[in-house]
Amino acid sequence: MTITTIPWIVVLGFGAFFVFAAAREILHRRKHGPPDNPRDVFEFDEDAPSYEDPEPEPDAAQDDVTTDDTPHGTAEDSDDTPDPDADPDTADRNETPR
């Protein structure tokens, strides 16, 4: 058995399964007729209103928002002082010393 025959076995197996299912469905339809569609019994109301998207609400909260124009994370705020007990090999790579 070569490597190219294995996919054909899988494909033929699935094909045989679907052919068997189709044959059973055809025989069932011949014996019992087409299936009943429950939607055929439902009566549609032609005068009913159709669906419309709701109108978007005005965004009143935008007027009250104040913006802060100061930069965040400036050099004065950071704590970049090196730890004197840290391993010099890992201090430059932002790793936790072991």
Image (cartoon, grey):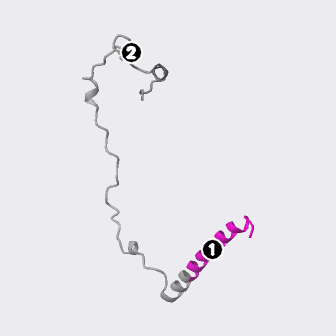
Residue carrying label 2: 84
- For mark 1, does the 10 Å Cα neighbourhood hold few (<14), some (14 to 19), or many (20 or more) residues? few
* Location of residue 51 in the rendering, given as x and y in whole percent from the top left corner: 34, 53
Q: What element does badge 1 sit on?
A: helix
- For residue 73, above or below residue 30: above
- The residue sitting at 61% across, 72% down in the picture is 14
Of 73 and 91, nearer the camera is 91
Task: Please provide percent x and percent y for residue 2.
Answer: 75, 67
Instruction: Residue 97: give x, y in percent of width and height.
Output: 42, 26
Residue type at mark 2? Answer: Pro
Disc 1 marks a residue whose amino acid type is Gly
Residue closest to the eye, 89 or 2: 89
Residue 61 quadrant = top left
Residue 87 is situated, as x and y percent measured from the top left of the image, at 44, 21
**What is the magenta range?**
1-23
Q: Residues within 10 Å of mark 2 (few under 14, many from 20)?
A: few
Report the residue that reaches farthest toward the bottom: 31
Q: Earlier in the sequence, mark 1 or mark 2?
A: 1
Q: Is residue 92 magenta?
A: no
Instruction: From the image, tell me which residue sits under label 1.
Output: 13
Prevailing secondary structure of the magenta residues: helix
Q: Nearer the viewer, residue 48 or 32?
A: 32
